[in-house]
Amino acid sequence: MHARFHVPDAERTGDVVALPHEEAQHLIRVLRLKVGAAVRVFNGRGAAFDAVVSAVTKAGAQVRIGAGCEAAAEAHVAVTLAQAVLKGDKMDEVVRDAVMMGVAAIQPMVTTRSEVTLASIDRGHRQARWQRIAVSSAKQCGRAVVPAILEPRAFEAVAASLADMTLRGPGLMFVEPSSSADALSLADLDATPPRETTVMVGPEGGWTPEEIERASTVGRLVTLGSRTLRADAMALVALTALFTLWREL
Amino acid sequence: MHARFHVPDAERTGDVVALPHEEAQHLIRVLRLKVGAAVRVFNGRGAAFDAVVSAVTKAGAQVRIGAGCEAAAEAHVAVTLAQAVLKGDKMDEVVRDAVMMGVAAIQPMVTTRSEVTLASIDRGHRQARWQRIAVSSAKQCGRAVVPAILEPRAFEAVAASLADMTLRGPGLMFVEPSSSADALSLADLDATPPRETTVMVGPEGGWTPEEIERASTVGRLVTLGSRTLRADAMALVALTALFTLWREL
């Protein structure tokens, strides 16, 4: 299979476009491709093309865009994963997994029990890092779409944005089996997919009772079986379960 | 919540039983519990109890078994995960995840494209290591059952054991979207759960065409959507999707 590159400027067959710096370095230094090599490119917004390397210099690389080609199909449901930021590099893994499973966007979130702050996320340039991981995961899994990593926000700001359900459909907050008597099991959910939804996943220490109460006013509480799932596995499990219910897998 | 310990000898309320060495060390050195402390124990075969620490010495720890208590519900389908052994510590993560998702047993497997051999698995005492990881994962997720880690075997031995489908129902081999035109999507599978089944997941380099052909004679080929899933995420995704289909989540 030909190497795939993320080339945001790839729009039309016949165009000659430059690769972004990181992608060019990968093409030149790691894969050591030469002029004439066949590759594939995708623009991150859903279009993928065959392409041929047309220039390689110290400064960068260019490709000539060929015919459009197929990429992995996108889900019919636009899911935004609102994930409480996890400790260490666990959040990197969640971003990678969520992109692989087909989310439309990721909303990093700071909750009461998060062990990171919005300030530390900002200082660490984490949003840009997660966006690079999203590109890398899209390359690996064959998607032509790179999900947006949204500006990190506090839980309450995310909950407030979900309040207008007429626009976006109810959000789904995943909770531990013991944390709410009102939580639905997956089998209780409507198998008819919404057009879009927001899936909320909590931090290592879980949601506070106040957060669960707040979420129940702007969406539904959902629990997955009777076992306690690790925080860093919850997003992958929740997305897989939902996409199975909606017959996207 | 009280600390949980794996105590294979826990059978009847009123008995006084010794903890296995590792569990006793955890109780004494890490948690520093004293005589009289309330704990929970499970025997790995489905029974869980309240218990009280009744002796702590340099040599070990004993508990007095109290009333039976609830543990996480077990799935109605007995799933054996036949997983091609992955590189490095990726297999540890698969064992941890599969126990958390509720498998009944794990069959480590060496396939044509595996980068490990049965001899190196044996030399590295990997089966015993995976069994310890299964205990640890059962403790974390609240199960009272510790799934067996079966003796590692070659792919062909596993396939041959699946040939008698009258006993065990067909196996399910998960394959990449592009690797077989005959693969079913999850929505094509019967939503009525079998009593037991074997789920086969391949190594980083995928299955050979011969392995796929062989599996199609002793089970069904299944593919999950159109995206390429990482080998180390495949078991978690496949188990979650199947348990969702069978309404276990």
Image (cartoon, coloured by chain):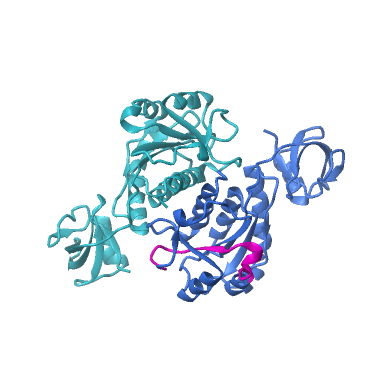
Chain colours: A blue, B cyan
Towards the viewer: B146 or B216: B216
Figure label count: 0
Is A99 a magenta residue? no
Towards the viewer: A238 or A113: A238
**Is residue B50 something one can see in this rendering?**
yes
Is A169 a magenta residue? yes
Report x, y in % for residue B73: 32, 54
Left or right relative to B183: residue A151: right
Report x, y in % for residue B236: 47, 47
Residue at the right extreme of this rendering = A15
Does residue B133 sit above or below B69 in this rendering? above
Could you tell me which residue is drawn at 45 percent across and 27 percent down?
B215
The image quadrant that residue A84 belongs to is bottom right
Magenta-tinted stretch:
A161-180
Towards the viewer: A22 or B146: B146
Could you tell me which residue is drawn at 76 percent across and 33 percent down?
A38
Towards the viewer: A107 or B193: B193
Could you tell me which residue is drawn at 36 percent across and 25 percent down?
B163
Residue at the bottom extreme of this rendering = A210
Report x, y in % for residue A33: 75, 36
**Is residue A114 something one can see in this rendering?**
no
Report x, y in % for residue B92: 42, 47
Q: Where does the N terminus of chain B fall, quadrant-wise? A: bottom left
Left or right relative to A113: residue B96: left
